[in-house]
Image (tube, grey):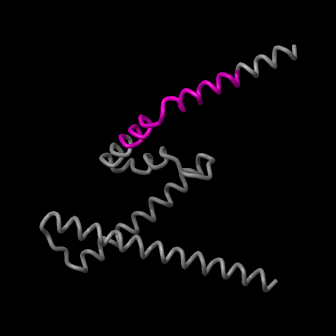
Amino acid sequence: MEGGNGSEAEREHDDDSVSKLLQDRFRLSAISIAEAQAKSNGMEIPEPITACIVDLAYKYAEQVAKDLELFAQHAGRKSVNMEDVILCAHRNEHLAASLRSFCNDLKAKEPQSERKRKKKSKKDDDAMTSDVHMLDN
């Protein structure tokens, strides 16, 4: 029994380590972005303000991640899709519009042959099903 508990404790420790690593990397990236934006606009951001911006961005990202997970669960899926992301951004119309545009661009870049092949294979499947069905009668 103790081996099972030790393994669970190790797993929790590993999860905490991964979370801490991701949090640190997020914070470093946010600081880098804030400093680059300030520099490109000829501004200087005091360290306490940068720390506040980074904390707010991290908390926002956490909330978005939780919302996305809930949207996917509500739809009965185990993974998040583009529609979940767009739905999550509904409070920010500019962001939602940008995401919709990005989604449409991705769909436009999808090779036509793949889209046609998917549709065609569905029709082929339907045709095969009806052929088999007709043979059963």
Furthest residue in direction bottom, as rendered: 2
Taken as a whole, is the magenta stretch helix, strand or loop?
Answer: helix
| Quadrant of res 10 | bottom right
Q: Is residue 137 left or right of residue 34?
A: right
Q: Position of residue 105 (x, y in %)?
A: 38, 39
Q: Quadrant of the N terminus?
A: bottom right
Tell me how many marks there are: 0
The residue under the point 35% across, 69% down is 29
The residue under the point 14% across, 69% down is 43
Q: Is residue 39 left or right of residue 111?
A: left
| Quadrant of res 40 | bottom left
The residue under the point 42% across, 76% down is 24
Q: Position of residue 118 (x, y in %)?
A: 59, 30
Report the front residue among 40 and 10: 40
- Magenta stretch containing residue 121, yes or no? yes
Q: Position of residue 16 (x, y in %)?
A: 56, 78
**Residues in magenta?**
101-126
Q: Relative to 61, does residue 135 appear above or below in the rendering? A: above
The residue under the point 47% across, 72% down is 22
